[in-house]
Amino acid sequence: MMYRTEFHCHTIYSKDSLVSPLRLVETCRRKGIDRVIITDHNSIAGAIEAQKIAPELVIVGEEIMTTKGEILAAFVKEEIPRGLTPQETIGRLKEQRAFISISHPFDFTRSGHWQEADLLEILPEIDAIETFNARCLLPRMNKDAQEFAKKHNLASTVGSDAHTLFELGRATLTLPQFKSGSELRAVIRQGIPQMRRTGIHARVASRYAVLHKKICKK
């Protein structure tokens, strides 16, 4: 059995998304996504809520801001706080046997942009890097990640980085069956990618979400 897997998406529990866990689940089912790793910013609350709705579909993940860049994790059992060093973050994830990737490593427009020297320090400790992120504005950003992965013999993930419903499924990886972080590590290099870039309107939607939440708080 092969699973079409969305590795990177967000719900309303991220500050820049208005997607409810229920609507995310419904949209994934409609679009033929077999597994979805929900990776809210520094939170697993949305993923847990969605997993209660669809335990066969949802994997709990988290996108964690470290002192050097963002780490993307799957099969997270305990939430990791933002602001730790990459080494501290990875250590906590390893205790949970999570699958550890790096999100959009060479997208210099993001706050989670990595320096290559910092990436090199943690290469032995990670399972993959995201070599295609549908929200990267320039093709070169993904190309640099692909070349880096090839140079260092790293496994690849791809992700829609969806903050809206229309983005879900823009970039997925179809994989043999897996049920844990260790099983995902075993099959990750067999992944078949499907990739389409998303336009700048997706970034605009995220800015709107941030503004909307600020207004609603007042």
Image (spheres, rainbow, N blue to C red):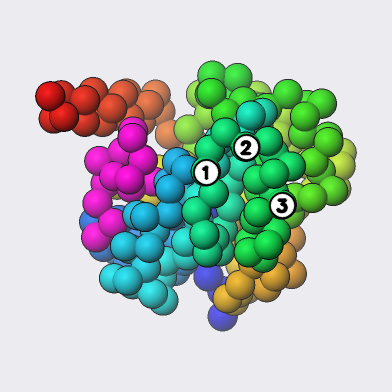
Q: Nearer the viewer, residue 10 or 13?
A: 13
Residue occupied by mark 2: 84
N-term-proximal mark, 3 vs 2? 2
Q: Quadrant of the N terminus?
A: bottom right
Q: Secondary structure at mark 2?
A: loop
C-alpha span from label 3 to label 1: 13 Å
Three-letter amino acid code at the position of disc 1: Pro
Which stretch is magenta? 9-22
- Residue occupying image coordinates x 87% and y 38%: 151
Q: Is residue 140 visible?
A: yes
**Magenta span dominant secondary structure:** loop
Q: Secondary structure at mark 3?
A: helix
Q: Position of residue 21 (x, y in %)?
A: 28, 56
Left or right of residue 211: residue 188: right
Residue 4, compared with residue 171, is above or below; it is: below
Residue occupied by mark 3: 91
Residue occupied by mark 1: 81
- Magenta includes 171? no
C-alpha span from label 2 to label 1: 7 Å
- Residue occupying image coordinates x 52% and y 64%: 77
